[in-house]
Image (tube, grey):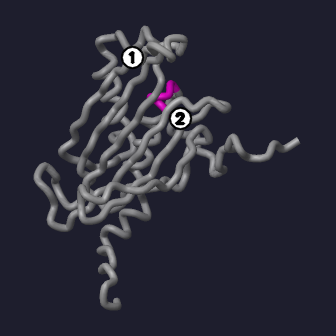
Amino acid sequence: MTLGEPPAPPAAFRRALETLRPAEVRPEIELEDIPAPQRLAPYSGAVGASVYRDDDELAVGRLIMLFDPEGQRGWEGPFRLVAYVRADMEPEMTTDPLLGPVAWSWLTEALDAHGARYAAVGGTVTRAVSEGFGGKADDPVTTEIELRASWSPLDEDLSSHAAAWCDLMCLAAGIPPLPPDVATLHRRPARRDDPKVP
């Protein structure tokens, strides 16, 4: 290390960061590395995702890993994961009083199904209705669900947590999880700007 260079990130952070992006994802999910927030913890990393059906984007989200060797208040250990998912919803679904508890169960059940060990989980489920006025009065009314959550992973290997987050994204988009005996595909889904294959 030369003078003025920041110290190398701790090995535990580097190992965890390598597992933040799932190696296998469903064909409906498109992943991308995104900038991570810099002020929440000494070290951080993030991945973003979109869920598509054909060319329609059904849900978007991000998964952020925070690492502080000293830990922080409310954490149980040096790591904290922060997840965000937003998806369009049918208007009648957003009025269902059980939507919040059901959406929250999508997260906890996905974590449990993937064997992700975690502690100190918390978050919110928000329903949003957007109406246009003035120059946007002709815009259609849109309804969305938004889930924000954070939890402390109890292992450095975050692959099970990332897989659970991908399942959460699909559930929010209205795509059921794959049965346990069905494997995901290894190919990347076609992007809208890819050339069409005849």
Could you say which quadrant of the image residue 149 lies in? top left
Q: Quadrant of the N terminus?
A: bottom left
Q: Quadrant of the C terminus?
A: top right
Task: Give the residue displayed 32% in from the left and 74% down from the top.
Answer: 9
For the stretch drawn in magenta, the main secondary structure is helix
Residue reaching furthest to the right:
198
Left or right of 182: which side holds 150?
left
Mark 2 element type: loop
Tag shown at residue 178: 2
**N-terminal label among 2 and 1:** 1
- Magenta segment, which residues? 170-174
Kindly identify which residue carries mark 1. Answer: 129
Q: Residue at x 42, y 32 (%)?
A: 86
- Which of the numbered marks, if any, corresponds to residue 193? none
Q: Position of residue 183 (x, y in %)?
A: 58, 44
Crowding at dot 2, Cα within 10 Å, few <14 / some 14-19 / many 20+, comes out as: few
Task: Choose mark 2 or mark 1, whichever is in front.
Answer: 1
Quadrant of the image occupied by residue 127:
top left
Image height check: is 36 above or below 98? below
CA separation in Å, label 2 and label 1: 30 Å
The residue drawn where x is 56% and y is 41% is: 29
Q: Is residue 145 above or below residue 182?
A: above
Coordinates of residue 139 in the picture (x, y in percent): 53, 15
Residue 52 location, quadrant? top right
Q: Is residue 66 above or below residue 106?
A: below
Q: Nearer the viewer, residue 19 or 138?
A: 138
Between 123 and 34, the residue placed more toward the observer is 34
Disc 1 marks a residue whose amino acid type is Val
